[in-house]
Image: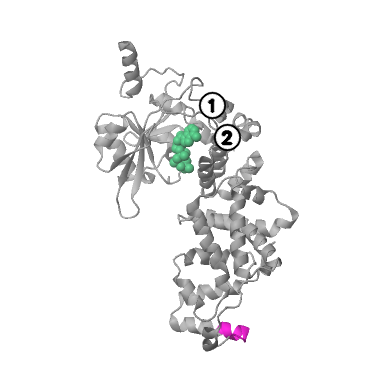
């Protein structure tokens, strides 16, 4: 009984030295001159966290994607720290530290600086569970993964060799358990362990493989790629919220177009998100739709790569726009009035998504706002434009409208008109309003306009991309 208890405690307290029981072996120690990580790319806060932990007697490293990006010379978007201190021990060392998660707790240490607050995620070394016991589903999928372990075990449970390196900012040394640095040099993405087993444990790793290949430009190692064709269907068993998060990461990676091509090549897009099927199954009649989506994704990639923000709502609004136009057009053909036809089409388009992965509610309202703003860009009479620029989501609607102009779905002159309208002063705006009147020659006078109850329908969707 007592031995059992002691064993449990030993297992639980990562401060107690573990034997390297799972053949992870000793790591390769890579000095600065070999890894060439530029310390200027490090987050000062992440370094503060590792120093504080080390000064308190713990081991602490920057880990995972941040080390991969640093070794690639890219500035990481966020920093994770791994340590042998328990979450409670970590929390005691920092003023702004919050415990996150129930089963496997991690600590978020927040720093408030000039810009956005920075969160450094600190996790305790975690063990890899073997395929036995109640934490593994029949398919091999791991349901529970919450046992602390040694650093070697922590490295072994990570996905790719290039994601399993530990960087110590104090000694500027990288600890590499699985040949990640050699794979970086070979530009290879290699799964740690037996790829098929690792995909069965967590099918999302297949999507991650595609995402990282697109991001790094690396090739998937043959053995890492091979099982995907057969095991891709296991993604059906993954909870849809998790799948949605991963697809979102993929779309927001700054390399979305390449990643989507990668999904297609790997045969992984079917059934993930109906709109992905849509984008990728290029039919003869969907060329216009593809142009729009391609441009939207290229635009998103460019924004992300240059450090600008992108809202997921905006992105989904663009991806679903060709579908929406089709539905809108169909409704109009049935004789529905223009605006109700648009709103009905929005409902239909969003409902189609529920057959695969539901678009989260919070994005849905953004999408609806962006879409319903579109006809308003063509109403350049009376008070309409003045009111439109005051709407809180104007900027998103405007950016969206510019994309429509770029594919020729909407006249580029309209986009230019709005660009001028928001850049000028009141007199300039009045002149622009007058220019529209002259353009059409038959705009109603303000007095008449005020009297008219029902404004003429604005955008007949004939101009829609097919
Ligand atoms: P990104 O730049 O997209 O954040 P990342 O590699 O940091 O890439 P995260 O999802 O933030 O990806 O995960 C952090 C680290 O956790 C990874 O580098 C990897 O070591 C490990 N990891 C994350 N997800 C998995 C998974 N599904 N299976 C195994 N290890 C994982
Ligand atoms: Mg990360």
What residue does disc 1 label? 137
Q: Quadrant of the C terminus?
A: bottom right
- Is residue 41 found left or right of 355 in the rendered image? left
Q: In the image shown, does 460 or 219 lie closer to the viewer? A: 460
Could you say which quadrant of the image residue 167 lies in? top left
Q: In the image shown, does 219 or 280 lie closer to the viewer? A: 280
Q: In the image shown, does 391 or 210 lie closer to the viewer? A: 391
127 up-or-down from 419: above or below: above
Question: What residue is at 33 percent from the left and 28 percent from the top?
Answer: 84
Give the CA distance from mark 1 to mark 2: 10 Å
Q: Secondary structure at mark 1?
A: loop
Asked if residue 428 can be seen in this view, the reply is: yes
Indicate if the residue with disc 2 has its beta carbon within 8 Å of ligand 1: no
Q: Name the colour scheme.
A: one colour
Magenta span covers which residues? 435-443
Report x, y in % for residue 384. 51, 77
Q: Secondary structure at mark 2?
A: helix
Report x, y in % for residue 186. 55, 34
Q: Is residue 352 magenta?
A: no
Q: In the image shown, does 196 or 387 lie closer to the viewer? A: 387
Question: What residue is at 24 percent from the left and 35 percent from the top?
Answer: 92
Q: Which mark is residue 237?
A: 2
- Is residue 176 found left or right of 89 in the rendered image? right
Could you say which quadrant of the image residue 155 lies in? top left
Q: Main SS of the magenta segment?
A: helix
409 up-or-down from 63: above or below: below
364 up-or-down from 127: above or below: below
Q: Quadrant of the N terminus?
A: top left
Label 1 close to label 2 by CB (< 8 Å): yes
Could you say which quadrant of the image residue 14 lies in? top left
């Amino acid at each position: 009984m007592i031995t059992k208890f002691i064993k449990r405690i030993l297992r639980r307290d990562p401060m107690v030295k573990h034997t390297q029981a799972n053949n992870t072996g000793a790591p390769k120690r890579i000095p600065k001159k070999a890894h060439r990580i530029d310390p200027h790319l490090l987050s000062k806060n992440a370094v503060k966290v590792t120093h504080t932990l080390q000064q308190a007697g713990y081991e602490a490293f920057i880990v995972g994607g941040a080390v991969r990006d640093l070794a690639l010379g890219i500035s990481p978007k966020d920093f994770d720290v791994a340590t042998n201190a328990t979450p409670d021990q970590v929390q005691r060392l920092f003023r702004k530290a919050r415990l996150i998660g129930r089963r496997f707790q991690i600590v978020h240490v927040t720093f408030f600086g000039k810009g956005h607050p920075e969160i450094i995620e600190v996790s305790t070394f975690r063990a890899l569970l073997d395929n036995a016991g109640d934490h593994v589903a029949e398919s091999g999928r791991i349901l529970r993964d919450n046992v602390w372990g040694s650093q070697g075990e922590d490295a072994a449970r990570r996905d790719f060799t290039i994601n399993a390196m530990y960087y110590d900012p104090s000694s500027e040394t990288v600890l590499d358990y699985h040949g990640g640095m050699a794979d970086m040099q070979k530009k290879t993405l290699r799964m740690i362990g037996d790829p098929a087993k690792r995909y069965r444990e967590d099918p999302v790793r297949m999507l991650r493989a595609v995402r990282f290949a697109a991001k790094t430009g690396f090739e998937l190692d043959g053995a890492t790629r091979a099982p995907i064709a057969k095991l891709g269907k296991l993604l059906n068993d993954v909870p849809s919220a998790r799948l949605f998060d991963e697809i979102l990461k993929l779309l927001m990676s700054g390399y979305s177009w390449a990643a989507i091509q990668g999904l297609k090549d790997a045969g992984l897009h079917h059934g993930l998100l109906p709109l992905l099927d849509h984008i990728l199954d290029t039919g003869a009649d969907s060329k216009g739709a593809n142009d729009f989506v391609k441009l939207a994704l290229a635009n998103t990639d460019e924004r992300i790569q240059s450090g600008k923000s992108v809202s997921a709502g905006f992105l989904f609004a663009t991806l679903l726009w060709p579908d929406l136009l089709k539905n809108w057009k169909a409704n109009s053909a049935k004789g529905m009035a223009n605006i109700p036809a648009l709103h009905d089409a929005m409902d239909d388009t969003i409902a189609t998504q529920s057959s695969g992965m539901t678009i989260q509610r919070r994005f849905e309202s953004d999408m609806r706002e962006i879409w319903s703003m579109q006809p308003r860009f063509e109403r350049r009479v009376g008070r309409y434009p003045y009111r439109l620029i005051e709407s809180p989501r104007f900027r998103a609607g405007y950016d969206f409208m510019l994309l429509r102009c770029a594919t020729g779905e909407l006249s580029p002159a309209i986009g230019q008109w709005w660009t001028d309208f928001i850049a000028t002063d009141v007199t300039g705006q009045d002149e622009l309003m007058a220019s529209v009147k002259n353009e059409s020659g038959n705009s109603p006078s303000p007095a008449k306009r005020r009297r008219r109850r029902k404004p003429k329908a604005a955008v007949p969707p004939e101009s829609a991309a097919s």
